[in-house]
Image (cartoon, rainbow, N blue to C red):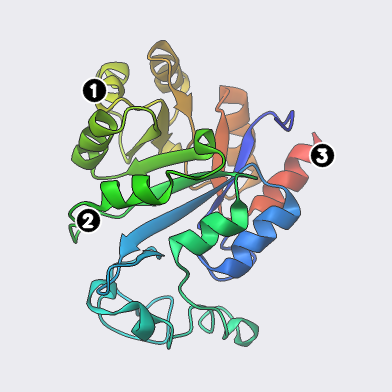
Amino acid sequence: MTGRPAQIFAHRGGRRWGPENTMHVFRRCLELGVDGIELDVQRCASGELVVFHDSDLLRTTNGAGNLVDCTFDELQRLSAGAWYGDEFAGERVPLLSDVLALVDGKLTINIEVKNLPFRFAGIEDELVEMLSGYPAREKIVFSSFDHELIASMSKKYPDWTYAALMVAIPENLGDYAASLKATYWNPDHEFLDEKAVADARSGGLKILPWTVNDARSWLRLINLGVDGIITDDPEGLLAFLEEG
């Protein structure tokens, strides 16, 4: 534990200091000493689990088309960083296994499983198998906007930690999260207020809102008592917390 009033989770590794979901930003997370990393996982055409957010390649690579149609070898011929700056042209779409080896239990990893709009049958089994020998399973959190996936995964693998990732607040939040066997609630921060926090606490949920990038919002959420904050600017949030 860091003793911070809220844990710092770097959104896609921290998009303010480098190209998202690349080894460069994940290394920066280790150097800075954030509490956690939020990243996205999906499966490419040759079967590997890769760290990538969008369903298509256009925004964050120099390629085009859908990631699911590309093999890993094809992805490695693309730059995952040139769009952010010439100095990052050598960055490639990483394997999840490479990120796990880098982090090695030092930070919490919130793995958002991308199962929409493309369905990745059996991805939950692959994830659990890959992580079976991970040195700190208590520092792995699975989240997804596909709540059916989280419900089925938590039923099949109840010893792991799950988060209910949401863009709105359902009625009976605690009951809904319990139906998913979630212990974290990851809401859009703009919907959070005292009542929502109280509802989450009554259901025993930890609260990890996204994606929060300004000091006024950081202060509001800390005053609400959230457990952590997912941000594109982990360096800025760290400085803000250190200023007190």
The residue indicated by pointer 2 is: 116
25 relative position to 73: left or right:
right
Q: Which residue is mark 1?
A: 179
Quadrant hosting residue 161: top left
Which is more N-terminal, label 2 or label 3? Answer: 2
Category of crowding for the residue at label 1, using alpha-carbon neighbours closer than 10 angstroms: few (below 14), some (14–19), many (at least 20)? some
The nearer-to-camera label among 3 and 1 is 1
Quadrant location of the C terminus in the rendered image: top right
Q: Nearer the viewer, mark 3 or mark 2?
A: 2
Q: Which mark is residue 151?
A: none
Report the residue at 43% width, 83% height from top.
76
The quadrant of the picture occupied by the N terminus is top right
The residue located at (28%, 68%) in the rendering is 47
Q: CA distance from mark 2 to mark 1?
A: 20 Å
Q: Three-letter amino acid code at disc 3? A: Glu
Residue displayed at 43% across by 76% down: 60
Horizontal and vertical percent for residue 96? 45, 60
Residue at the (55%, 27%) spot, across then down: 226
Q: How many marks?
A: 3
